[in-house]
Amino acid sequence: MLPYPSGKLHMGHVRNYSIGDALARYMWMRGYNVLHPMGWDAFGLPAENAALKAGRDPREWTLSNIAHMKAQMQRMGFALDWNREIASCEPEYYRWNQWFFLKMFERGLAYRKEALLNWCPECATVLANEQVVNGCCWRHETTPVEQRAMQQWFLKTTAYAAELLDDMKQLEAGWPERVLAMQRNWIGRSEGAEIDFALENAPDKIRVFTTRIDTIYGATCLILAPEHPLVSALMTEVTERLRIKEMIDATARQDPAKLEKAGLFSGHYAIHPFSGSRLPIWIGNFVLMGYGTGAIMAVPAHDERDFEFCRMYGIPVVPVIRPEDGVLADGETMTAPFSGYGVLENSGQWSGLPSVEARQKMASFANQNGFGAEAITYRLKDWGISRQRYWGTPIPIIYCDRCGVVPVPEGDLPVRLPLHVKITGQGESPLRSVAEFMNVPCPRCGSAARRESDTMDTFVDSSWYFYRYCDPHNDGAPFDSRLIAQWFPIDQYIGGITHAILHLIYSRFWTKVMRDLGLVSNSEPANNLFTQGMVLKDGSAMSKSKGNVVDPDEMVDRYGADTCRLYTLFAVPPEKDMDWNESSVEGQRRFLARLYKFVTRNAGRGGNGDFNDADRQALRKLHQTVRKITNDFDSRWHFNTSIASLMELVNELYQLESKLSPAPIREICEKLTLLLAPFAPYTAQDLWEGLGESGPIFRHSWPAFDPNLAKEDLAEIPIQVNGKLRGHIHVAFGTPREDLERLAVANEKVKQFVQGKQIAKVIAVPDRLVNIVIKPEPRP
RNA sequence: GCCCGGGUGGCGAAACUGGCAGACGCAAAGGACUUAAAAUCCUUUUCGCCGCAAGGCGAGUGCGGGUUCAAGUCCCGCCCCGGGCACCA
């Protein structure tokens, strides 16, 4: 069980951990070996920003934040495995981030390129695509992201796109459907073909990606993304280039959903590889450089966007797909494109073929003639990991004027973060101003060289920290693979839905890379994922930037840690979002007090002897409760109903208390305390010691239930007449159908509804119910 | 537009395989204890109607249909709310 928090502890974390902790305690009590640690990771930005404001050293500041959080969590009584605690900001850990980086660099999985990148002015750093939400930073939801051209390091997540998608089949049983759906969406596989269009008066080709090669005879122009490399070759005039530049900037600023289409004719033409006709080459702001090839063939008759664009600029519309049972549209007069499948028309030798068949045949024709092939495109992009921050793992690269890009030799790791760095928040990496860090001899030629000054995204830390937990003090390797084979894949991972496409894709990617490095044998990090709901305050998720966090300390002061934990478990089932509303916390406190009082005042009353009726009733309820809570733990973790059944038990014990003999008292007190232990460990431990026991209660075995004791003496069978409840009878379990029918009809309450009417039939389900169906009265 | 969730009392919710709708808790009301208050303990509490009362009758799980002896649960068609993706070619 491996959850992890980020930022400062708030009620959302408390809920997350209360769920994981209850489960871990239960598993311990059932005799399982459970690794139940926690991670300190994506701490960089908040810590650094806070340090900047407070004028303090970011490292010291972060470590003190971690210490504070740890104290809070210990106060909550979470039985985390502190011996395996990992601060991913420590050189002992990030050394292995650097080691992995070098391994990926060797294999071409880490590379550097200049790219237009998402830049958050507030964080003063680059963001990964995954960290951009609605054109804004994921931390600053109202700060629009800007585009900047920078040299950046990337990890080649796209090399694993197909596998990340295919392996989701293995996860279907254990991962929530909505997480898989989000990842499927994010990876965005689409099948089609890549086709080359030759330029009319130049040797260059324009490659386009299309999912609808069957519509290619309807292509009436090509459209390039404004960032497309060919654009600068085609558009040489200064005024033209300025207009392209404007187009790029305007596109970046706009919310893409509201962007108006705009285009520019390049003055050049390409040759249609199938028909040989001339197609004008345009530049269009709606064509994305980051998807497919950054160029499209426009088929206005059969695509919404192309239609809009071509109508805007008077480019002809040529329908080539006839709907089945329909007629071919007229390009001059059609008001909307037809984007469905149908039968090809005006498409040379392919006319008359249905779309699906034509797609295959035309792609292989293109392949045979050397101007295209079937292709699969993914929306997923490579993971940009460079950050212009102090806080993070230094990227182990040295730039030498003579040798170029030189990786730091493995033996020189870790490249340590210098201490006492001045944070300016001014965009450039703070490390760049530290001369003793920056200036190093080149490892190859020994001449003066410079270090890479960017640090890694802290999501690198969280991508594999849970592997390190199995072997946290290993000096010679990230971990011992044999230990990993024992523990992995993780049986149960618990985390927030917020990580569905960030952390949970990165860590899947990292696992596959480690597998290909021969370090692990599993392809997926976790068999089962549980995404617990968020704690909402004022309608949105608690986050520091929104200032709507509820600090657990205050609540613990007022009510105690156990009440606080019980409340987060009782209010709603764990997978649901929970609105923060303190009004019912009182009830949890009352319940704990009632249970505590019952056990303490009865602790010394135990004895031997025969059971009386009250004893038997109490024991029955006790064993039913053990059964119920055990089932809840083993199947679904609806801790709200588990706690509700504990409340029922306590209520019943209060009712029976004065009639109980000493005989069952010991068993009742003991099992009641054990049942409470996963949810309210402090109270349970206290009661446990009060019962004369010693040692941690969660090392004691989970109580068993006796099915015979849990069984009711008689079954209460509801009697319905025409589906309406009219009475009950009490019979022995297993009373056969015929007896039930007879007893039901003879029942006094039922008689008055049945008397004088004709019984059509009687449905009797043993131990369940009886339904008497009477014929409607004939109309007079 | 596409893909996931969800809609049940004044509120948070429960009902696990189609079988007694509203467990448990909050809030509210009443009672016991107390000089008093708090705390605690006990009782009532889906709505409407009838009854002095025990109790009785009817309606009821977003809306409209359907299947079934029986539907919160299954099927068809809608409405609303939340989340994710989105000029993705």
Image (cartoon, coloured by chain):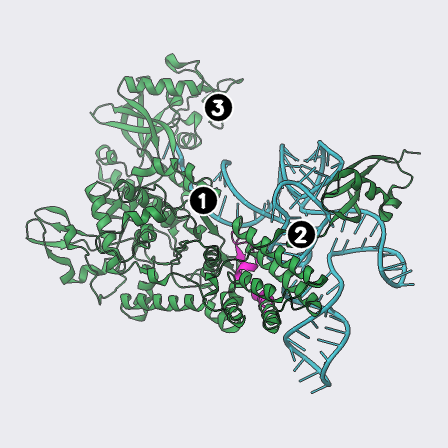
Chain colours: A green, B cyan
Of badges 2 and 1, the one in the foreground is 2
The image shows residue A652 at horizontal and vertical percentages of 67, 63
Between discs 3 and 1, the one toward the N terminus: 1
Left or right of A646, for residue A702: left
Quickly name the residue at label 2: A711
Q: Amino acid at mark 3?
A: Thr
Circles 3, 1 touching at the beta carbon (< 8 Å): no
Q: Chain of mark 2?
A: A
The Cα atoms of the two marked residues, 3 and 1, are separated by 45 Å
The image shows residue A776 at horizontal and vertical percentages of 86, 35
Badges 3 and 2, same chain: yes
Q: Nearer the viewer, residue A552 or A254?
A: A552
Circles 2, 1 touching at the beta carbon (< 8 Å): no
Q: Nearer the viewer, residue A528 or A330?
A: A528
Q: Residue at x 72, y 43 (%)?
A: A734
Q: How many marks?
A: 3
Quickly name the residue at label 3: A333
Secondary structure category for the residue under label 2: loop
The magenta segment: A568-589
Badges 2 and 1, same chain: yes
The image shows residue A99 at horizontal and vertical percentages of 22, 50
Between discs 3 and 2, the one toward the N terminus: 3
Quickly name the residue at label 1: A179
